[in-house]
Amino acid sequence: MKSILITGGASGIGAGIAERFSEAGYAIAVFDRNAAGADEMARRLKKSGGPAISIHGDVSEPADAERAVAQTITAFGSLDVLVNNAGIEIVGTVASLSVEDWDRLLGVNLRGAFLLSKFAIPRMKPGSSVVNISSVHAFASYADNAAYDSSKAGLLGLTRAMALDHGPSGIRVNAVCPGYIQTPMLDKWLDSVPDREGTMREVLRSHPLGRIGTPRDIAEAVFFLCSDAASFVNGTFLVVDGAMTVSGK
Ligand code: NAD
């Protein structure tokens, strides 16, 4: 049985990825700083028949990252897929962001992916794969997102570097760039804007398909990238945004 370690697996996109891979027969390690959420997710997955464990910790802490990899391998015997999904958003320009907020955001979104990969890669066998959850913010900037945009662009650089360095060991590394996806993170952002309904109408207008994405939409892309169908896909990114960015709105 193959296993997958998903950071931020207790909520939103991470939870969608956990469900998709569990349905496909993977053993799931849900790693999240939200301990109760991770436990609940693992319990739900086990109830539907698949092996699952929850691991509590912070992706930006080296000891937690190392322990997450070790616990996954102890529980399931191998680590076949790592998904660096945990992320936070803190709005602000370079002028308004505090140094602490910049460090905190980069610590989770970019350093976290580095740390998990650092401890996972040496223990992964040929045929394994890593997927980094970046964002359309990696190449399409939005006002007030200096730290978030930088972290997501940085993840694409990390993806390319890892693909080059670890391809010779048979490990593929790719990224997914989601657009607007219905998750608690999106809800939190909508709560912070002055006109929630008006903003949502505008968001929908920028989507040619007339809807925003679901965690399942992203999970399917991640699943493809980790599958044998993508065995020659390496060092690149898949935009999953319903053509929102090509609409130019
Ligand atoms: P979410 O807030 O619903 O879930 C994020 C999860 O990560 C939570 O369970 C949270 O507890 C966990 N987490 C946060 N910081 C952590 C840390 N330091 N250590 C361990 N766990 C931590 O968010 P989401 O919308 O599902 O986002 C998941 C990823 O997708 C993020 O990287 C986000 O930037 C990216 N993304 C989201 C959207 C969107 O529209 N929702 C769009 C593009 C990219």
Image (tube, rainbow, N blue to C red):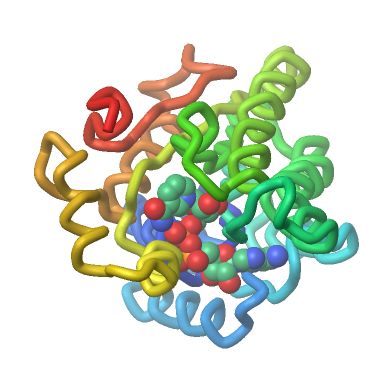
Residue drawn at point x = 76 percent, y = 36 percent: 121
Residue drawn at point x = 33 percent, y = 35 percent: 240
- Position of residue 236 relative to residue 158, above or below, is above
- Position of residue 73 relative to residue 136, above or below, is below
- Position of residue 186 relative to residue 44, above or below, is above
User: Is residue 31 in sight in this rendering?
Assistant: no
Residue drawn at point x = 15 percent, y = 49 percent: 211
Q: Is 113 left, or right, of 129 in this rendering?
A: right
Answer with the quarter of the image where residue 225 lies.
Answer: top left
Q: Position of residue 71 (x, y in %)?
A: 74, 65
The residue lying furthest to the bottom in this view is 36
Q: Position of residue 206 (x, y in %)?
A: 20, 39
Answer with the quarter of the image where residue 244 lies.
Answer: top left
Nearer the observer, 106 or 196? 196
Residue drawn at point x = 65 percent, y = 27 percent: 159
Q: Position of residue 141 (x, y in %)?
A: 50, 35
Q: Position of residue 202 (x, y in %)?
A: 20, 50
Please count the marks in the image.
0
Which of the image's four quarters has the C terminus? top left
User: Is residue 192 in sight in this rendering?
Assistant: yes
Q: Is 5 left, or right, of 198 in this rendering?
A: right
Nearer the observer, 34 or 210? 210
